[in-house]
Image: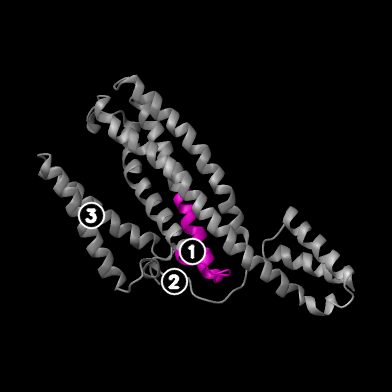
Amino acid sequence: MIEEYLDDLGRELGKVGIRGRLRRRILAESEDHLRGDADALGRFGAPAVVANTFAAELGARTSRRAAVGAFVALGFAGAVFAFSFLGAALAGQPAPDTWPLLAQLALPVLIVAPQVSFVAGSLALVRVLRRRERVLPSEELTVINRRTGVALLFGLVTMAALAVIALELSDDVAGWWVALTLAGTALAAPLLVLASLPAAAAARLHPAIEGSAGDLFDDLGFRADPWRFVRRVAIGLGLVVFLVAAVQGDPFDGALNGAAEALACLAGFAVFGRYLGLRS
């Protein structure tokens, strides 16, 4: 009876994504408990229920750790990006319309990717900090894991685009900027890859816990119409971009860049809204 129960438990653990060393450890501890107590088998519960309980508790804990670890790695990548952006002017970076073709192609990626990464990573962190329950609904875990994964992916894309631009401009800017930018991306990229390992482990777990995934307003702590809210945010971002450029004496480009920023915000909400749990 014990062997049959352990075989069933092993299969159920595999179904919910618990495999490898962790699965073997759970089975070994379960066997010790069952053989040490003659009445334990009747109290243990059905294998599917036990496996789901393990996956539910492990899923919430692993998703939290992955989100926090990703945010730390993204923080370092963000520092590399900020250094490169602020140091470009001191390094004598030429106007973008004079860049080599590959650098010009990488520039839009460098503008969009870090924003997607920052928003997704921040929302993942906010959700895990707000939700301290031991077990979370399966749909909510999926949203957290998606946010973490998207943040790390676009963080890597940002570092790749930054490295491409640094290499392409190596003959036109100060050598120290190129060297430090490439060194920073070379350090940040492995950190992001390492942070993706616990994120991948969290995504492999599939507990069956009822409940909704929530949306952006569960993260923010208030309710509003999603599209009305994002339109206001987009207009605000556009105005900020315009005002910064206007203060620098370039209102026309500021208006174009502000409009592009607003449209990008709306497009991001449309594309990622449901996938990242921003709207129902």
Residue span colored magenta: 130-152
Estimate the x, y position of residue 71 in percent, counting from the top left.
46, 50
- Horizontal side of residue 58 vs 183, given as left or right: right
- Mark 1 / mark 2, whichever is N-terminal: 1
Q: Position of residue 99 (x, y in %)?
A: 28, 29
Tell me if label 1 and label 2 are in contact, CB under 8 Å: yes
Badge 2: few (under 14), some or many (20 or more) residues near its Cα, within 10 Å? some
Mark 3 and mark 2 residues within 8 Å of each other at the beta carbon:
no
Q: CA distance from mark 3 to mark 2?
A: 25 Å
In the rendered image, which residue does mark 1 sit on? Answer: 143
Circle 2: element type: loop
Give the quadrant of residue 180: top left
Residue identifier under label 3 = 237
Position of residue 274 measured from the top left corner of the image (x, y, whole percent) = 42, 66
Q: Answer few, some or many: residues within 10 Å of disc 3's Cα (few below 14, many 20 plus, some between 14 and 19).
A: some
The residues bearing labels 1 and 2 have C-alpha atoms spaced at a distance of 9 Å
Between 114 and 180, the one nearer to me in the picture: 180
Residue occupying image coordinates x 24% and y 59% = 234
What residue sits right under mark 2 in the picture? Answer: 214
